[in-house]
Amino acid sequence: MFKTLLASALAGGLFIAPAAAQSIGGSYSVAGTNLDGSTYSGEAEITLLSDTTCSIEWKTGETTSDGICSRNDNAFAAAYVLQDDFGLVVYKVMPDGSLHGLWTIAGKDGNGTEVLTPQ
């Protein structure tokens, strides 16, 4: 009986995974601030490679950068290459599926901000 109820509930979509357990792969709109406070926007694509790892590509204006990423519950981090520099961004996965983060570039002062919103 329990197996029948469980199967019915799963088939009916009654069990919904919490936001922190949902997939983060896919397309995102990007809105951020640079180290100097100026703003930028664009798109990002996250491609899942395993349950916890992924690749990420940002396209902002004429600039494209690629990185690797990893997720642990509601923490999401990516290391990336931007022209000749490398950097790090750490995001918090929000309940609505957006990613709110702070980023920096090696050897530079300060940090920028970025929000990735699922498209």
Image: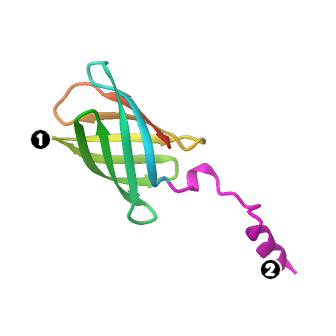
User: Of the residues under marks 2 and 1, which one precedes in the sequence?
Assistant: 2
Q: Residue 3 has which mark?
A: 2
Q: Is residue 100 left or right of residue 21?
A: left
Q: Is residue 85 left or right of residue 52?
A: left
Whether 91 is drawn above or below 9: the answer is above
Whether 72 is drawn above or below 41: the answer is below
Q: Nearer the viewer, residue 116 or 60?
A: 60
Measured as percent of width and height from the top left, residue 3 is found at: 80, 80
Measured as percent of width and height from the top left, residue 111 is found at: 30, 28
- The quadrant of the rendering that contains the N terminus is bottom right
Q: Is residue 95 left or right of residue 65?
A: right
Which residue is farthest left?
Answer: 84
Would you say residue 84 sits in the magenta stretch? no
Alpha-carbon neighbours of circle 1 within 10 Å: few (<14), some, or many (≥20)? few
| Residue, disc 1 | 84
Would you say residue 11 sits in the magenta stretch? yes
Q: What is the CA distance from the residue labelled 2 to the residue labelled 1? A: 56 Å
Name the residue type under label 2: Lys
Q: Is residue 109 left or right of residue 7?
A: left
Q: Residue at x 52, y 47 (%)?
A: 74
Look at the image and give the residue range highlighted in magenta: 1-23
Whether 1 is drawn above or below 87: the answer is below
- The quadrant holding residue 95 is top right
Helix, strand or loop status at disc 1: loop
